Amino acid sequence: MGDYVRQMPHQGSSDLAERPSTAMRFHIDVPLLLLLLALTAYGLFVLYSASGQSMGAVIRQGRYFAVAYVIMILGAQVSLQRYMRWAPWLYLAGVGTLLAVMFFGVGAKGAQRWLQIGGFRFQPSEIMKLVVPMAVAWYLADRILPPRFKFVLIALALVGLPALLILQQPDLGTALLIAASGLFVLFMAGIGLRYIFGAAVLAVASAWPAWVFVLKDYQKQRILTMLDPESDKLGAGWNIIQSKTAIGSGGWQGKGWMQGTQSQLDFLPESHTDFIIAVLAEEFGLRGILMLMSLYLLILLRGFWIGLRAQTSYGRMMAGSLTLTFFVYIFVNMGMVAGLLPVVGVPLPLVSAGGTSVVTLMAGFGILMAVSTEKRTVAQGM
Amino acid sequence: MPQHITLKDPHRESRIYSARTVAAIAIVLALLAVILTRYYALQITEYETYRTQSDRNRVQLQPLPPKRGLIYDRNGVLLADNTPSFILSIVRERVSDLDATLTALQGLLPISAGDLENFQKKLQRRRPYEAVPLRFRLTEDERARLAVNRYRLPGVVVDAQLLRHYPHGALFSHALGYVGRINEREAFELDESDYRGTFHVGKVGVEKYYEDILHGEVGYQNVESNAHGRVLRVLERHAPVPGADLTLHLDIRIQRAAVEALGDRRGAVVAIDPLTGGVLALVSTPGFDTNLFVNGISSKDYSALRDSLDVPLFNRAIQGQYPPGSTVKPMMGMAGLESGLVTTESTVPDPGWYRLPGDSRRYRDWILRIRGTGHAPRVDLNMAIAESCDVYFYDLARRLTIDRMHEYMSPYGFGERTGVDTTSERSGVLPSTRWKREAMGQVWYPGETISAGIGQGYVLATPMQLAMATSVLASKGQRKTPRLVSSIDGEPVAAPLLEPLVAKDEHWLAVYEGMREVVHGKRGTAKYLSKGIEYDMAGKTGTAQVIGIAQNAVYNEDEVAERHRHHGLFIAFAPMEAPTIAVAIIVENGGGSSAAAPIARAVIDTWLLGEAG
């Protein structure tokens, strides 16, 4: 690879730069692609068992993956400048659709999250997971970093507006993920430690008012259940007791593929979606968990590496934010299934069955690939 | 403005970014370590706990109730068997909202308040994941309705179970007793592990006496089932040991003959084989359908049985204590001969009444009312038995005294439970001075000895005791505890032998002759029985005066008269040369022994001559 060369863009006339690899030409980050392929293959393998040996479920999920890979690769072809140019407009459109959801949206299970256009259902909050960091990065990219107080405030407003709109849908999980993705941009932009500590203090201080004024009853219940699942064994605590039992009974070796009694005998709820890690833990044991974590860690490290090599502030901030957001998925999902965090609707990235999060995540990896292969284009343009 | 002067510094920004990346990686690693620690704790440190919990989730120990032993009569006729019945149970752990489920079930099939109450009680004592019965005896229609609605009733289980069934219903009600649902007190007394999965227990009679033998041993199986409670496979199985089958001495033919002969009268018949001590018939009428009790009798049916003037739930054969009347005369005669107070030749003058020396009160002979005189100027033992002379026995009783009478009569089984293998037997009364002192705190009066001599006064005996006494008489003093059960799982069970009553053979024969003349003699009190008889029968009539009806508080005018009539009694054994059956019969308010004696003939005919007889 021409990594060394790309570190010195002004030597663009060297032989290596003259012959970009096929992967480079198509803006593919090969290590990242291989890791993602390994992860999604592992995910399908687990899903087959978790869905009760349903080949239909695997094919459906495979189709989602196929669409998602295409979107990722298409997304990688778009130059970062273009993403930056689009950012404010996408942001405005996104906030607009969120407002539309608030007034005209359709809902399910007591939450109003979708927009119905013809026969097509569309969840604007999902797109905002990408649009919010894009917008914050756009806002900060041309400024001197670390940003001054005024810009930090404006950036926070850019994050806060969509996050609050989603929070009232209500969709706490997505709101937190979107807020995190925006805040990660600020973090990577190098905002002072005093902001970070300030935010931490504020978060702790706001816990009480949030409990009283913001959190809905069912959300409070989830937190209480996490703290003491035994208090409601057959009700809200059931999920968490069963998932912990599934995980714990897997031991080091696991019970074997399709041999998990918790998952195969329907004791584990949501076994193919949000709680799929419990199936993996039960059937493949701690070994399987370590393998999954290794894959995730390599993807994360690759993401950080891409950020470190990025040439522009915009690319750097996007890479850092997308990588950290990916991590939040992992942390929240694995934590909630193991009873460390309250149950919020966050899937295990690229493993849980479902199309929406897969497409968003892979689109994010597309942007990451665009960052990864950006310099060459920029360098050539210079 | 300062920011116009300060330019972007790519190197500084890059440096800051690198530092932030390092920090981010550090945080990511730290948090992943937290997650990993958690998974390590669950999967390695607490592995055993969760492994056990997951096994407990999927594997359940199911009790396998044993099949209750069957009961046959001596001819192999099935008297108690088990028929499949369907039970609706609930596994509490699989039901999220019990009230909603119960409401839904009530919409599908009738569930009584009693069912619910029993269910709630059992719910408190269940083991985790144990199915608690709610409704028994589901009809086919109810099962179909449950099957259709099964998807919305998680945790609701329908199981087949064998349930006791009495094919002959009322015919054997008092002979067999019945099983019923285990009640709270019984649940407390029974060994809980032996009765896992068993909902019934013997309540009275043979069913209760032989409970341990009939019940068998509980087995169990480990089954794997899913979250909805559906059993997927059996992992391990320990088969239950079925209860032993009982064969009784009872003979359905005699039982039926006795019930038919009694008809709609209240009474009791007990027949014993003197050779074995086996009980050939145990009848108390009216009976009742024991099947009603198997699954909890309805309160309407129960109050009908409980409040009936005829007290059908009362087992007259072993609980009914009646004055035996003149039926004690053969045993009294034996006492006179053995004590030497009388001989076969000695006589007593009989003016039709008897007076204690120094007392003006006259004790009348029953014949005085009819003939205005005694049986004969002088009466010997033979005539005293054959014609049931009271005066002869008044005199004997006086000379014997009550305590010696007690001594001579006890070996026949009077005054204490016979120990027959069934429940709720009563002991009757064989009075003595000591008995009166202890039971009533009073001294014995000589006049009381006189009535005791003819089986009246304080003397009380159950039909079972009378039958045993007759059997002792018939076998010349061989004493055996009466037995209903002849074999357990084909293994014969002998009646426990008691110390025999030793008496001179000629004494036995003398008494036998008197009893033979009761039936076959010209002036026998039951001479009408001998018409067309094909064997020699020894019998003795008896009449018991009714003082009052204690059990019944309410009765109407017409019935008062009927219920004040004398009880008719009769004891008999046959054939005389080698007796194989001894019977005792009482017909309440039968008027006299003539109500009872034909029943003995019917019973003995059936036994000796077969059904044609």
Image (tube, rainbow, N blue to C red):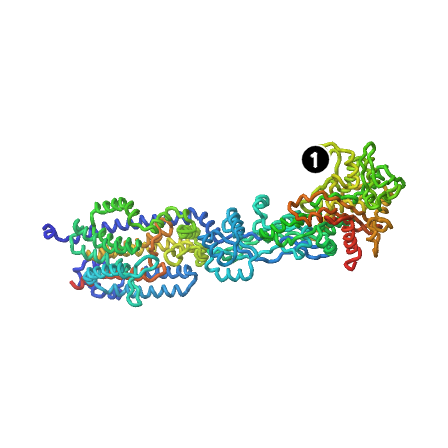
Front residue of this view, candidates A80 and A67:
A67
Choose between A240 and B562: the one closer to the eye: B562
Which quadrant of the figure has residue B404? top right
Q: Is residue A69 left or right of residue B418?
A: left
Residue at 31% in and 67% down: A119
Asked whether B132 or B270 is in front, the reply is B270
Q: Is residue A307 left or right of residue B488?
A: left
Amino acid at dot 1: Ala
Quick check: can you spot residue A69? Answer: yes
Q: Position of residue A117 (x, y in %)?
A: 28, 66
In what element is the residue under mark 1? helix
Looking at the picture, how far across and down is residue B512, in whole percent? 84, 46
Q: Which residue is mark 1?
A: B439
Residue B139 position, x and y percent, is 56, 60
Q: Is residue B496 visible?
A: no
| A330 lies left or right of B557 | left
Circle 1 marks a residue in which chain?
A: B
